[in-house]
Amino acid sequence: MKKFLFLAILISLKSYSQHNRFSGTWSNENCKNCKKEYIFTITIAQSNYAIYGTAEVTSEHKELNSGILEVSGHVYPLGDRAVIKLKDKDGISSSAVLITNEGVLQFTKRGGGDLVPKEIILNKLYE
């Protein structure tokens, strides 16, 4: 009986951790309470603990446009936090932390080049 319960706990933990919370396209396009100096869009595909995708900052101001950024990173074991690295075509990179909570994604820049905003709340546009 103990072996059965242990096996059931392991299976439930494994299935909980494989929920891909970060997959989809996230953006601040639909933000109602923020200034619209730029639009940050990130498209992520999550496979177990790995994250890959693209990101882009678009703006009317040329100095804020980033072009297409390559995204790579990993998800922490509980699945609600991820660390990503964003890299542009010239090799300039910056790192950030993503935290998902109730359908929104909190993006917090940790360091690196000025490619992306320091902190932003993103809403999911589509899967």
Image (cartoon, rainbow, N blue to C red):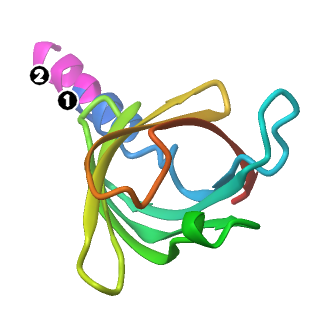
Q: Is residue 62 left or right of residue 82?
A: right
Quarter of the picture containing the N terminus is: top left
Label 1: few (<14), some or many (≥20) within 10 Å? few
Residue 42, percent from left and from top: 56, 61
Taking the magenta stretch, the answer to whether it contains residue 94 is: no
Residue 36, percent from left and from top: 79, 46
Residue 109 shows in the view: yes
| Alpha carbon separation for disc pair 2 and 1 | 6 Å
Q: In this view, does 103 lie to the left or right of 56?
A: right
**Which residue occupies the extreme left position in the image?**
3
Could you say which disc has been placed on residue 7 in the image?
1
Element carrying mark 1: helix
Residue 6 to residue 21: above or below:
above
Identity of the residue drawn at 29% across and 58% down: 113
User: Foreground residue, 86 or 14?
Assistant: 86
Region of the chain picked out in magenta, as a range: 1-9
Residue linked to disc 2 = 3
Identity of the residue drawn at 64% across and 33% down: 104
Residue 102 to residue 110: above or below:
above
User: Foreground residue, 115 or 123?
Assistant: 115
Residue 49 shows in the view: no
Residue 119, percent from left and from top: 49, 34
When asked about the image quadrant of residue 57, the answer is bottom right
Type of the residue with mark 2 = Lys
Type of the residue with mark 1 = Leu
Whether pointer 2 and pointer 1 mark residues with C-beta atoms closer than 8 Å, the reply is yes
